[in-house]
Every structure is written in structure tokens, then in C-alpha cells.
Image (tube, grey):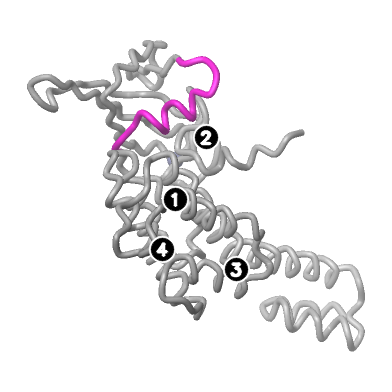
Amino acid sequence: MPDQSHLDNRYFVDTTIYNCPFCNRRHVSYTIVVNFSFDWTDKKRCFGHIVRCHSCGKKSLHLTFKDLEPQHIGQIDGTNRWRFTFGKSAGQVLDEVFFYSVPTSFFVLDERVPRVLRELLTEAEGCLKSNYLTGASACARKIVYELGALSKATGDNYKDRIKSLKAKHPDVEPAFFDTLLTIQQVTSSKVHENSYDGWEAKHLRIILASLSEVLHEIYVVPALRDDRRKAILALKGEVVPPTAKSNNDAQQIAPADGPASRGRG
Ligand SMILES: [Zn+2]
């Protein structure tokens, strides 16, 4: 089966499933409970949709300038419900057309990623959705700067900091850092960083996706590996009588289980 984990990084997976920002559950079903529209300007209409999570019941708000014409599907729990009615790649379409969502897609970055970096990435994505490219570019640069500071990377400019980060994190897929460098090269005909204007939307999407992967690999992957290691060792501790060595392991990995394991031994 092809890897589908990219769907975990979306707000909307398709017309029936989304990643709930409240209960943090991936792939739960949702329906629209309220549709409304208002005049953004005298020529531009804005459409709002409030969707409800079928797991926790909490409601989120989503704004778009596109009339999505949701379809009424009947009642659930005595209230009217609608669904968006796209065909293929509905999730991608929905994530692109909504320029404003509350809560934001903050939840898509694991909380093991330092807060300052999550906030910057969320802000960058918000800017990009509203087409505030200067803001998004500034946030992307700040992420590289802050990540550099946290990683004790060196370099006075964006390019050198990326190179230093790549050297500091040999376990992270180098292609992500290389992508960040390549984008910088193809977009910057100017030699000095100070004269640099910012990136276009198509570049920013790649940059933010790469940064998101880098943060995931630096902060989340090692922690997940460690969790699995602890879980396996804990299971092993339940079936293998603790010898001097395994007892040592058990104490190291799961102090809370220590007395029970010793009791059974
Ligand atoms: Zn929920």
C-alpha cells in the first residue's frame, strides 16, 4: 500500500474525513453544521462554513472566497448537516481554498517541535494562504534562523545556516536541506541577501513543506523511535525473567514498572 502519511498533514483529508484540531485525532469524520456568507468588500463575497467533528463534537470555522456549494445530506442528532461535494483530491482543494481557519492547522506539527518553530510555521502557512508572500518569506527565514540558534548552527546568511544545519543533523534526509538551498539559488539572482525581495507562492510551498519535514525528522522521529524502543523493552520485561542485565534495561527504560517487574521476578 502506498504511503498515505502526507494526509496526516492536511486539515481536510476529503469531503467526509478531516484531522480534528480539537481532539487531535487523525482521520475522523465531520459534517458542516452552518453555512453563511457576507460581503468582504463591495465586490467580493466571502463564504464561511462551520464544521463539526463526529468524535469530540467541537466546531471549527473556515473561510473562503470560493462558493463551494455544499450539499444538504439530511439531519444528524436533530440538526441539519451538509457536505462539500468535490470529487478527487477534495482535501487538497479544501486546504487550498480556505484562507482562514480557526483553530489554525497548528496541530499538524507535533508538540515535540519547539513552540517558537511551530508558531512561525503556522504563521508562514497563514500568510501564504492569504497571499501575504513577504510575511510568509520572513517567517520562513526566521524558522531557519531560530532552528539554527537551537541547533547551534553557524553562518551569517540563509545559505550558510542551511549548510551548517545539514552538517549538524546528519540523520535528517539531506534532500530536504538540498531543496531549501536549491530554491534559494533558483529564486535569487541577487548576490546579497539584504537586497532579496522574497519568494513566490510556489517556492514558499516547497520551502515550508521542506522545513516541516526537517522539523519532524529532528524533533519527532527520534522521540517516536525512543517510545517504540521503550514499549518493546517493557513487553520483553513482562515475559523474560529479569536477569541482571535485562533488569538493568527495565529499570532504565520504565522506572514505573520497576517494582512490579521485580515483584514477579
Ligand atoms: Zn474532534
Q: Nearer the viewer, mark 3 or mark 1?
A: 3
Residue at the farthest left position: 42
Q: Which residue is mark 3?
A: 166
Q: CA distance from mark 4 to mark 3?
A: 15 Å
Q: Is residue 162 found left or right of 38 in the rendered image?
A: right
Q: Residues within 10 Å of mark 1 (few under 14, many from 20)?
A: many
Above or below for 152 versus 184: below
Q: Position of residue 232 (x, y in %)?
A: 79, 65
Q: Residue at x 39, y 62 (%)?
A: 191
In magenta, the rendered stretch is 86-100
Identify the disc placed on residue 245: none
Q: CA distance from mark 3 to mark 2?
A: 36 Å
Pointer 3 or 1: first along the chain: 1
Which quarter of the rendered picture does the N terminus lie within? top right
Residue at disc 2, CB closer than 8 Å to ligand 1: yes
Q: Residue at x 44, y 44 (%)?
A: 203
Mark 3 in CB contact with mark 2 (< 8 angstroms): no
In the rendered image, residue 77, in percent from the top left (x then y), is placed at 39, 22
Please say whether residue 26 is one of the residues in the magenta stretch. Answer: no
Distance, label 2 to label 4, CA atoms, is 31 Å
Looking at the rendered structure, the kind of residue marked 1 is: Phe
Q: Quadrant of ligand 1?
A: top left
Q: Is residue 77 above or below residue 165?
A: above
